[in-house]
Image (cartoon, rainbow, N blue to C red):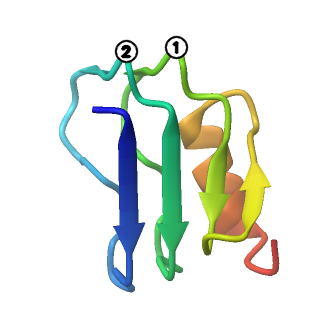
Amino acid sequence: MKYLVLKDLPKLVNFCQEGGCFNWPNLQTVRVNNIPSMKTFLRDDLNTPLLKSMYITFAKKLWLENLNKTISYMHNNPGV
């Protein structure tokens, strides 16, 4: 999978609550739009070596080392 789009999921807190590492070596782009409750993407590690940025509300580009840190920052700073 190269692209992941999450849109209009106002009650989603995280993508997966179960433990275990997701391995998406080809993931390049993540787009998040209207997911105000999301605090983290996964509980555990996520292998996404090609992912270097994500787009929030399809307009802004943000990347803070990994997907969980970026999602957490978005949640704590909703005006971003």
**Which residue occupies the extreme front position in the image?**
2
Which residue is depicted at the point 41% across and 29% down? 27
- Quickly name the residue at label 2: 25
Tell me the SS state at disc 1.
loop
* 48 is higher (above) or lower (below) than 11: above
Q: Quadrant of residue 20?
A: top left
Name the secondary structure under disc 2: loop
Find out whether the residues at labels 1 and 2 contact each other: C-beta distance under 8 Å: yes
Neighbor class of circle 2 (other Cα within 10 Å; few <14, some 14-19, many 20+) is some
Residue at left 76%, top 64%?
A: 60
Quarter in which the C terminus is drawn: bottom right
Position of the N terminus, as image quadrant, is top left
The residue sitting at 46% across, 21% down in the picture is 48
Residue at 49% over, 48% down:
30
Q: Is residue 72 above or below residue 36?
A: above
Viewer can see residue 16: yes
Task: State the image quarter where residue 45 is shown.
Answer: top left
User: Which of the two residues, 19 or 23, is positioned nearer the viewer here?
Assistant: 23
- Tell me if residue 13 can be seen: no
- Relative to 74, residue 45 above or below: above
Instruction: Name the amino acid type tagged 1.
Output: Pro
Q: Give, as a three-letter code, the residue at label 2.
A: Pro
Q: Position of residue 70 (x, y in %)?
A: 66, 46
Q: Residue 78: where, in percent of width, then height? A: 73, 78
Q: Which mark is residue 49?
A: 1
